Image: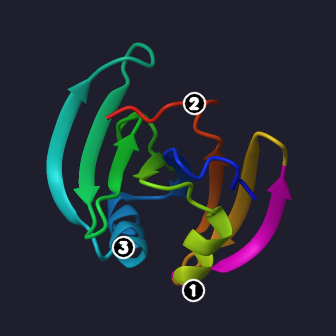
Amino acid sequence: MINAHEQSEGRLFLQLYCHDQEQMAQFYESVLPFARVSDYIHGTGGGGEGYRHLVLARKDNGGAQIHLIHAKSWEEKALIGNLHFCVSVRRPLQIREFIEWRGLNVVAYHEAPWQETLVFQDPAGNTVSAVAFAPEVVGCGS
């Protein structure tokens, strides 16, 4: 587990593969029901020609910043969507705690010195992979 940086912020990235916007919305609301939408941006941006970014920034009661980034438009990626959640917390976020607290079904777990990866399913059966990085390895863009 990543727990050596008790005085710094932790980072958790969730990557969700889903088939349509309705499925995306169901997952977002079921996994992060405690947060409120505080920002919304939709337009073209970095990541290559034709990429679009849909950003929903949420803030929970504990001050955790949560960013949802939809990296490609649904039209360009008709069969499957690729979403990235980035959760910034005031203390290192242990990924197992985050997942188990929400009652999600863990199907695989991998640990390395610089990161930990969890594959799980949400209540609707969507398969999701989550990666938590040590704070100095990668930042969380807003």
Looking at the picture, which amino acid does disc 2 mark? Answer: Val
Label 2 and label 3: CA atoms lie apart by: 28 Å
**Residue at the spot 25% in from the left edge and 70% down from the top edge:** 61
Q: Dot 1: few (<14), some (14–19), or many (≥20) neighbours within 10 Å? A: few
Q: Reading the chain from its start, which is encountered first: label 2 or label 3?
A: 3
35 left or right of 14 in image: left
**Residue at the spot 59% in from the left edge and 78% down from the top edge:** 125
Residue to which mark 2 is pinned? 138
Q: Secondary structure at mark 1?
A: loop
Quadrant containing the N terminus in the rendered view:
bottom right
Q: Secondary structure at mark 3?
A: helix
Residue to which mark 3 is pinned? 26
Q: Position of residue 108 (x, y in %)?
A: 81, 67
Identify the colour scheme used: rainbow
Q: Dot 2: few (<14), some (14–19), or many (≥20) neighbours within 10 Å? A: few
Residue to which mark 1 is pinned? 103
78 left or right of 38 in image: right
**Residue at the spot 58% in from the left edge and 38% down from the top edge:** 135
Range covered by the magenta-colored residues: 102-111
Dominant secondary structure, magenta: strand
Q: Find out whether residue 106 is within the magenta segment.
A: yes
Q: Quadrant of residue 122?
A: bottom right
Looking at the picture, which amino acid does disc 3 mark? Answer: Gln
60 left or right of 13 in image: left
Q: Find out whether residue 88 is within the magenta segment.
A: no
